Each structure stands twice: as structure tokens, then as C-alpha cells.
Image (cartoon, coloured by chain):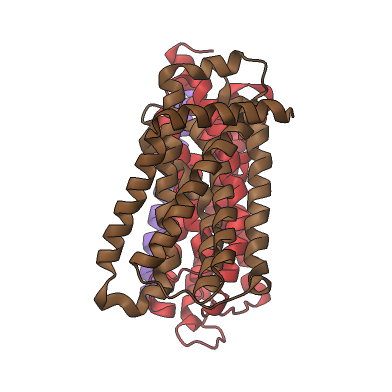
């Protein structure tokens, strides 16, 4: 995929401004909201950071799945590079999701971790990414590494929806997160941020894939 | 799929195993010693909370015993070079996988039948519900475990730190199964639930097993490649 | 309100640094 340098920079610039605008609104423009829980009235702001990052993590994971399946079908290593780069970004954004979640949880519900279905699913997703890399780092042969980690990627992905379903059952006895609603302005800022961070992710993905391909060429591969 | 080949593979593995009984003995010993450790940890002081954690302990023992068994089964094939022989024979990868699953499942059933009564005896576990239903649940969960375990073992066998990697890769994939199984076992053993009460968990376990079986069969040929 | 201003400033700085870094990597790759 060759982009003209102009387009990439324009995109980055747009993302930069959009996120800045979003943060400005989230932190300095919006006031407290109506909520059943007192701390949430101010803390809701975390949503603007947490949700986009969460969306990116799941997107990254899906791309890893696609890359894994396509590699097994086509045996073209470029799919494996895509899957691995997406997984790398996925684990980074996943860590950020967990951290933003914990920052939110402590003042809002008193504990850093709640074993809530969504939290647990995200944590499990993190472990799947980690296992994916653990496997990759212990196989030297490029083809074997691509093939085997693709299979693991597929297995890992299959477990996630099931985990969500079973944790929802399990934790239905425990107190659930109370939802709050944002006004239309806030919603549009949130959507803006989601798209911006997603765009940032795709740019990072493209960048990482490019670097990996160049590194491969440099090492003498094709 | 040729069932005859499948059963031949399973029978071969069983025959080899029962010549020396190394793997099954190690598994049973491991389960026994772990049970001993747990019964020491949980005697006396913590007896009140035992019903809550009991099923979890039982599944933990099964999972780790199972991983030892799986490791042994596949590493032995690799060490002895019999894996190449299998690949060369006119058996399809799916048949090899199913044969291995049956073999590992039988091993786990043996462990189950011995460890479950021991568990009840040594931890003085108050069984409220039907022990038969509990055994059925254990078997069901173990089936899912063995399916995913066999597939993942084959993948991990090609890596360098194979025995180390197996838990790391297997456990995240196994997580939903563990959750549903422990929950179901909890309900049956502690709350005395009957089959009707656990249909939800059983559905999840069955769905998991079915999905994982399909994925395992589809991907096994890639795992076997050289 | 003051905490939010400082959070905003810190976030803006980090964000700017990140984007600048990305542009830097991007230009390095172009040169290859």
C-alpha cells in the first residue's frame, strides 16, 4: 500500500487536531452530568479516553484474526506481518484500556478491579495477545512461526465471545456497572474521538507493517 | 473420516502407554500430591469456605494434571520420531487428531474416576447434589479440555520452550470452559442443583466444545506440517 | 477546574510529542 506522503501527513494533522479538540471539550468545556452516583458526575470524562482505546483494541484483535486466516489460506507472509503488527498494537492499546479502566474504577467504585464481564474479557484478550507473542518468540523458522501463531490467533479469537457470555452469567449476581447517558454534544465528541483514535491506530498499523517489511528486506529476505 | 483409523490410532497410543504406564502414573501421582497440598492448606481454619472453593480446586487439579499428560503424550511422539511415521501413514490429520483426543480423554477419565472420590474423602467435602451428575459434568468439561489441549499441544510441540509454552497458550483459550465448568460444578456439588438448573452452563460448555472441535479439526493439518 | 487544566496541558504535551515522533519515523522511512 503506497500512500503519498502528503495524505499521511494530512491525516496525522487532522487526527492531531481532532483529538486535541476532543480532549479540550472533554476536560474543559463539559460540566458535570446527571448521575445516580456522585463521583460519576465528574468521572464520566474518562469515557472519552477509555471507549476509543477499547474500540481500537478489539479492532486490532479482529485484524489479527483476519491476518491469521488469510495467511493460512494464501501462505503469503505479508498477512502474517499484518497479524503480528496488529497484535503488537493490540496489546499496547489493551494495556491502555485496562489502565484507563482501573483509573476510572478506583474513584468510581472504590476498587481498581471488579471482575466485571467487560474487564475480565479485556484482560483475557490481553493474555491471548501475550500468548500469541510468547509462541512467536520461541519459533525461529519464519514459515512455522507464521503458520502456528495464525492457528493460535484463531483459537484465541474464538474464546473471547464465549468468555463474554459466560462471565456475564457468572457475574450477574454481582453489582453491575451503572450506565449513565451522555447528551448529544458529548456523544458527537465521543464519536469524533473514536474515529480519530481508530485512524491513529490504522496509521500506526501501516507504519509498523512498513517497518517490518523493510526490516525483512534489509535482512536479506524478499 | 475413517473411524477405523481413528480407533487404531487411539488403541496404539493406549497400548504403548499401558506397557509402561509412565504417563498415567505420573498424572495420578501429581493429582494426588496436589490434593494432599490442598487438603493441608484447607483443613481446619478454612473449612467454612471449602464448599465455595472446592470445585475450583478440583478443576485446577484436573487442568494441571491434564497439561502434564498432554505434554508427555506429544513430546514423546516428537522425541521418538513416531510423529513422522504418523504423518507418512495414509491417515488424514483430522483422524490423527481425533485419535489423540480419544486417547487423552481416556487418560483424563481414569484420572477423574480416581481423583474425584479421593477429593471428596480427603477434603471432607460435603456433597449436596448428585455425584453422578457431577461426574457427568467433569467428563463433559474434560472432553472440551482434551480437544483444545490436543490441538494446542501439537502447535506448541514445534516451539522451543514447549512444556513452558503449553500452559501459557492453552489457559487463555481454555478460560471460558473453566469458568462455565467450575460454576456448574459449584451449583451441583454445593447447591445440590439438578440438571435443569445448570442448562445454561451446560449450553456454554457444549457450545465451546463444539466450536473448538471444529476449529481444531480445520487447523490441525496446519499444525502438523513440517 | 484547575486539575482539569493541568491534565489537559499534560495530555496535549504528550499527544504532541507522540505525533511529532510519528512524523519523524515517517520521514525516516521515506528516505529509505
Residue A50 in picture, x, y percent from top left: 51, 63
Give the residue drawn at x 46%, y 19%.
A141
Q: How many marks?
A: 0
Residue B31 visible = yes
Q: Residue at x 56, y 39 (%)?
A: A153
Q: Colour of chain A?
A: red
Display colour for chain B:
brown
Residue A121 place in picture, x, y as percent: 53, 59
Asked whether residue A19 appears in the rendered view, the answer is no
Is B209 rendered above or below residue A110? above
Measured along the vertical axis of the image, is residue A201 above or below residue B54?
above
What residue is at 38 percent from the left and 79 percent from the top?
A: A110
- Which quadrant holds residue C13? bottom left
- Front-lying residue, B167 or A122: B167
- Coordinates of residue B188 in the picture (x, y in percent): 55, 71
Determine whether, in the image, residue B153 is placed left or right of residue B1: left
Image quadrant occupied by the N terminus of chain A: top right
Q: Pick whichever, B85 or B115, lies toward us.
A: B115
Q: Is residue A140 above or below residue A58?
A: above
| Chain with purple colouring | C
| Image x and y of residue A152, in percent | 54, 37
Q: In terms of image quadrants, where is residue B133?
A: bottom right
Q: Quadrant of the C terminus of chain A?
A: top right
Q: Is residue A198 left or right of residue A97?
A: right
Q: Residue furthest toward the front?
A: B19
Amino acid at each position: 500500500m503506497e500512500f503519498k506522503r502528503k495524505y499521511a501527513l494530512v491525516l496525522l494533522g487532522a487526527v492531531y487536531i481532532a483529538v486535541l479538540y476532543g480532549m479540550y471539550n472533554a476536560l474543559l468545556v463539559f460540566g458535570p452530568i446527571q448521575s445516580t452516583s456522585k463521583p460519576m458526575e465528574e468521572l464520566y470524562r474518562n469515557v472519552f479516553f477509555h471507549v476509543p482505546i477499547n474500540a481500537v483494541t478489539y479492532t486490532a484483535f479482529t485484524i489479527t484474526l483476519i491476518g491469521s486466516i488469510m495467511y493460512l489460506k494464501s501462505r503469503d507472509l505479508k498477512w502474517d506481518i499484518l497479524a503480528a503488527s496488529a497484535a503488537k498494537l493490540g496489546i499496547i492499546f489493551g494495556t491502555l484500556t485496562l489502565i484507563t479502566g482501573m483509573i476510572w474504577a478506583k474513584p468510581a467504585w472504590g476498587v481498581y478491579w471488579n471482575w466485571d464481564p467487560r474487564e475480565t474479557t479485556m484482560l483475557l484478550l490481553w493474555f491471548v495477545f501475550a500468548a500469541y507473542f510468547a509462541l512467536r518468540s520461541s519459533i525461529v523458522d519464519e514459515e512455522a512461526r507464521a503458520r502456528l501463531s495464525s492457528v493460535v490467533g484463531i483459537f484465541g479469537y474464538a474464546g473471547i465471545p464465549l468468555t463474554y457470555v459466560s462471565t456475564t452469567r457468572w457475574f450477574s449476581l454481582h453489582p453491575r456497572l451503572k450506565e449513565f447517558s451522555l447528551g448529544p454534544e458529548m456523544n458527537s465528541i465521543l464519536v469524533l474521538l473514536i474515529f480519530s483514535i481508530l485512524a491513529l491506530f490504522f496509521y500506526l498499523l501501516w507504519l509498523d507493517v512498513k517497518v517490518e517489511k523493510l526490516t525483512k528486506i534489509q535482512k536479506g529476505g524478499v | 473420516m475413517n473411524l477405523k483409523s481413528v480407533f487404531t490410532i487411539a488403541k496404539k497410543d493406549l497400548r504403548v502407554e499401558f506397557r509402561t504406564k509412565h504417563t498415567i502414573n505420573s498424572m495420578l501421582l501429581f493429582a494426588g500430591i496436589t490434593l494432599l497440598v490442598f487438603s493441608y492448606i484447607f483443613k481446619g481454619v478454612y473449612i467454612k469456605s471449602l464448599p465455595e472453593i472446592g470445585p475450583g480446586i478440583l478443576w485446577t487439579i484436573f487442568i494441571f494434571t491434564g497439561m502434564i499428560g498432554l505434554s508427555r503424550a506429544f513430546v514423546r511422539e516428537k522425541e521418538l520420531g513416531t510423529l513422522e511415521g504418523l504423518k507418512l501413514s495414509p491417515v488424514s490429520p483430522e483422524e490423527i487428531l481425533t485419535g489423540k483426543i480419544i486417547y487423552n480423554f481416556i487418560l483424563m477419565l481414569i484420572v477423574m474416576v480416581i481423583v474425584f472420590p479421593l477429593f471428596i474423602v480427603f477434603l471432607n467435602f460435603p456433597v449436596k447434589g448428585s455425584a453422578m451428575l457431577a461426574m457427568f459434568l467433569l467428563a463433559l468439561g474434560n472432553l472440551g479440555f482434551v480437544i483444545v489441549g490436543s490441538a494446542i499441544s501439537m502447535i506448541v510441540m514445534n516451539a522451543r520452550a514447549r512444556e513452558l509454552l503449553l500452559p501459557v497458550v492453552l489457559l487463555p483459550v481454555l478460560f471460558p470452559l473453566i469458568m462455565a465448568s467450575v460454576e456448574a460444578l459449584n451449583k451441583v456439588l454445593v447447591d445440590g442443583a439438578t440438571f435443569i438448573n445448570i442448562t445454561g452452563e451446560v449450553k456454554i460448555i457444549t457450545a465451546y466444545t463444539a466450536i473448538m472441535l471444529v476449529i481444531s479439526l480445520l487447523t490441525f493439518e496446519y499444525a502438523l506440517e513440517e | 477546574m484547575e486539575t482539569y487544566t493541568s491534565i489537559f496541558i499534560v495530555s496535549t504535551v504528550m499527544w504532541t510529542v507522540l505525533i511529532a515522533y510519528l512524523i519523524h519515523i515517517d520521514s525516516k522511512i521515506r528516505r529509505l
